[in-house]
Image (cartoon, grey):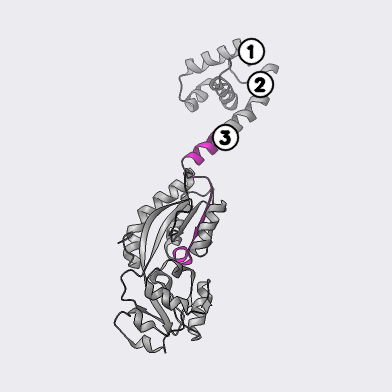
Amino acid sequence: MIRTEALRAFVTVTDHGNIRDAAEILCRTQSAVSMTLKQLEAELGGPLFESDRKSKLTELGAFVLDIVGPLLRDHDRALDLITGYARGYTGRLRIAAVPSVAALILPSILKDFVLARPEAEIDLFDTDSATVRHMLLRGDTDLGLASPATEPDGLRAIPLFTDPLVFVCNADHPLAALTRPLAWHQLTGERLILNETLSALAAPEFRSLAARSRLSVRNLTSLLAMIQADAGETILPGLATRALPQGVVTRALADPACTRRVSLLARDGRTPSPLAASFIDLLCDALPDMARRFDLREPYE
């Protein structure tokens, strides 16, 4: 059987015109390369070079080179692709994240991730937690960064951090003048605008307030615009209020249970691709610094 190593030695000698230079490239002795060529010629049943100088090919040698040269290049390229993919440097990664995480947590992480993987393709979708989960279940994305469902839904959740919820209102609102954390009874009668984050908030006092709400807005930009226009008030994760429009303020809530949980979500029973696994490692390494930077809490604190 003709070995790939023998064909590579033949092509390398042909490219350099002599055994000495080829031996250096192949990290082998000259005698080993010479013996490999003789064995290859024996396998083929004819000489590959016109003389011992290895500077001119026979008709057989020219034919073998025409066939083998492209095959070896394709072989090497295939191995590079396989190795790069297996080590998490190539491939395609689709990430869906809630807007606050996409805007504040991911930019610096993805910057380093992409710089180290110039051949990888990364798609980032920013949307609410419910849509993130639906995208994962449909197979439209590989990883999610969002709040987990309250009931089992076929997704695996790795807790990342918790984010305190805050009351968001127009700066002219009477509650904006208060400095102490707000209790639920102080929100009675407010024009609460619901958003998807609040679907996981189970406090009975909040559910009573939510039952009287007549307005729900899913998009964060639109929601803040409504508050800026004094069309109502809402409750949002603190991370989502880092860049508020003029005239919009936040106030802390007294209920310690008012938090948003953010987890790394993936389909249960599926092994992540090497590229996804590399991203998960980088994300987990960066989280402690991000938690200090944005005043986030440990998971489920």
- Residue at 66% x, 21% y: name it: 64
Q: From the viewer's perspective, is 32 left or right of 62? A: left
* Kind of residue indicated by mark 1: Leu
Q: Considering only order in the chain, which callout, 3 or 1, is on the residue closer to the N terminus?
A: 1
Q: Is residue 6 above or below residue 197?
A: above
- Residue at 51% x, 81% y: name it: 226
- Residue at 39% x, 83% y: name it: 188
Residue closer to the observer: 84 or 21: 84
Q: Considering only order in the chain, which callout, 3 or 2, is on the residue closer to the N terminus?
A: 2
Bin the neighbour count of mark 3 within 10 Å (Cα to Cα): few under 14, some 14-19, many 20 and up.
few
The answer to which image quadrant residue 145 occupies is bottom left
Q: Which residues are magenta?
A: 78-103
CA gap between label 2 and label 3 equals 21 Å
Bin the neighbour count of mark 2 within 10 Å (Cα to Cα): few under 14, some 14-19, many 20 and up.
some
The residue wearing badge 2 is 64
State the mark number for residue 78: 3
In the picture, which quadrant includes the N terminus? top right
Q: From the viewer's perspective, is 101 left or right of 77? A: left
Residue 58 seen in the figure: no
Give the SS element for disc 3.
helix
Mark 2 or 3: in front is: 3
The residue wearing badge 1 is 44
Q: Does residue 301 show up magenta in the picture?
A: no
CA gap between label 1 and label 3 equals 26 Å
Labels 2 & 3 near each other (Cβ < 8 A): no
* Kind of residue indicated by mark 3: Ala
Labels 2 & 1 near each other (Cβ < 8 A): yes
